[in-house]
Amino acid sequence: MAVAGALAAPAAALAQSSVVINGFIQVSLDNMKVSNAPARLNSSETRVNDESSSVVFNVTEDLGSGLAGIVRVDFKPNMDTGSLAASGESWVGLRSRSWGQLTMGRHGLHYFLAPDDAYFKGASYRVHPSSLTDFAGGGRIAIANATRTPNSIKWTSPNWGGFQAVVAYSTNPLASAGVEADMAAGNDARDGRAWNIHPTYTAANWKVGYSYWDGKADNPRAVYNPAISGLSTAPLGTSTAAPSLAGQLITADQRGNTLYGHYTWAGWKLGLLWNKTELTAAATGAGLAPIGTRLGDRTAWSIPLRYATGPQTFMAAYTRANDDKATPIADGAKMWTLTYAYSLSKRTHLALSLNQLKNDPGAAYTHYVDAGAGINNALAAGEKARLVTFGIRHDY
């Protein structure tokens, strides 16, 4: 949908600018059943979920000589609860035909990279491979936030014959509120920052990409702070008054490498993703490992497969997070998903998925976006979950 500019702006100012509104609305109905869960009084629930629906405002002003001013504001209307926030990928910047695009704001960096099409056909993102590949520390710690990174600057190169590169930097990447803490009282540690380097090459029927992430929090402390954590329930010692393993994991330095790609032929698409993530202690306390200790060293991989014929799409994915080499307990996980999607049009899709996620005794991986303090369906260590979802998506 195109809008000819802001209503209050002078007509002369609209001559070379435009506003385009697009996005999608996606909602799912699901049933989750947890087994190997002795601490739960009720082991199943049925839910209606918003699936990160978006209303996106894209503003472009032609500045001449191949240069344009650009703005993106991504509002996230929760169709189930009614809340609204500009928490999507939102930024302002410049775009040039010769040197590419430079933007500042919130950007999606180093996450949701698995070449799996199910979400874009209406399936819940709870069954996406990111449930395992974008988390470490036995599933308890989100890497690169597993969502948009705040306080970030991103350069995207022009497309050079299929090759394109992204280089991004964040001044404070690991705070959920995005608040800088460089000059906070008592900050005797360091300033946080993150780098993301992400080159890709796209051909007619295949693509390959690599993403590197190096993130460090502002003012790291080993005291658990639920306001900034993506920590799922687990017996890690979650005192908010004293240093703990939970606090040490949340503020650990993050380093991730992801290699991914896909190949398509005759209706088929085969994808592959491999990820290696390391966590290093950036803060310590009584009874905890010293700064610089390797807290996490795990690899994960995923194989998505798709077959499309007419309006029907059949999809499957197998994802595994291997046992962490830096921990003494078994803390890997396995997940598989089967999805059938039917497209009523090019923009409206229905999807039915069956999913299972199984944790090792020390792992607490959870379906994507269900992790986090205070969420009652976040899985605890050793639990297994079966998920059946029906979703509908409309792109506009």
Image (cartoon, rainbow, N blue to C red):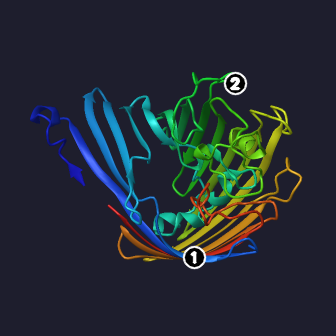
Label 2 to label 1, Cα distance in Å?
44 Å
Tell me what residue is drawn at x 51 percent, y 33 percent. 179
Q: Quadrant of residue 219?
A: top right
> Relative to residue 110, is residue 330 depicted above or below?
below
Question: In this view, which residue lies farthest toward the front?
Answer: 241
Q: Quadrant of residue 393?
A: bottom left
Tell me what residue is drawn at x 60 percent, y 65 percent. 376
Residue 45, numbered label: 1
In the rendered structure, the answer to whether residue 321 lies left or right of residue 378 reads right
Q: Nearer the viewer, residue 121 or 292?
A: 292
Q: Nearer the viewer, residue 272 or 94?
A: 94
| Dot 2 or dot 1, earlier in sequence | 1
Q: Position of residue 175 (x, y in %)?
A: 57, 38
On the question of residue 31 being in view, the answer is no
Amino acid beneath label 2: Ala
Crowding around mark 2 (Cα neighbors within 10 Å: few <14, some 14 to 19, many 20+) is few
In the rendered structure, the answer to whether residue 393 lies left or right of residue 171 reads left
Q: Position of residue 291 (x, y in %)?
A: 80, 31
Q: Nearer the viewer, residue 231 or 114?
A: 231
- In the rendered image, which residue does mark 2 sit on? 189
On the question of residue 184 being in view, the answer is yes
Q: Position of residue 284 (x, y in %)?
A: 79, 34
> Relative to residue 90, is residue 299 depicted above or below?
below
In the rendered structure, the answer to whether residue 17 lies left or right of residue 337 reads left
Question: In this view, which residue lies farthest toward the left?
Answer: 11
Residue 23, numbered label: none
